[in-house]
Image: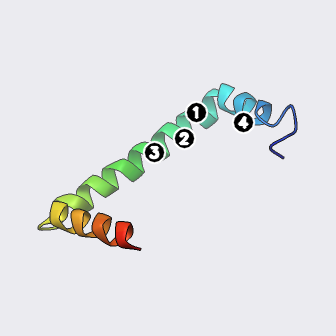
């Protein structure tokens, strides 16, 4: 609940633990690495990205 005074304390307490921080760092790195590998395989990635931005702006 956003208005609850302690609504930020639970995530802060959880992230204070080294296990969760380690797992979060590992997962984030894995996601980033997989995305970079996929992008490297696509010809014209920047063109596709620019087209998607244009479509989003028109929508």
Q: Residue furthest right?
A: 4
The residue under label 3 is 28
- Name which of mark 4 and mark 3 comes first in the sequence: 4
Query: Is 43 situated above or below 27?
Result: below
Residue 40 spot, x, y in % from top left: 17, 58
Give the crowd class for mark 1: few <14, some 14-19, many >=20 residues within 10 Å. Answer: few
Q: Residue at x 55, y 40 (%)?
A: 23
Report the front residue among 45 and 12.
45
Q: Residue at x 80, y 43 (%)?
A: 2
Q: CA distance from mark 4 to mark 3?
A: 17 Å
Report the front residue among 8 and 26.
8
Q: CA distance from mark 3 to mark 1?
A: 10 Å
Q: Quadrant of residue 16?
A: top right
The residue under label 4 is 11
Determine the secondary structure under disc 3.
helix
Q: Is residue 22 left or right of residue 48?
A: right
Give the crowd class for mark 2: few <14, some 14-19, many >=20 residues within 10 Å. Answer: few
């Amino acid at each position: 609940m956003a208005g609850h005074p302690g609504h930020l304390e639970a995530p802060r307490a959880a992230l204070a633990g080294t296990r969760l921080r380690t797992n979060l760092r590992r997962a984030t790195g894995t996601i980033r690495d997989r995305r970079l590998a996929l992008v490297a395989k696509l010809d014209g990635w920047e063109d596709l990205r620019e087209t998607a931005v244009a479509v989003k702006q028109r929508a």
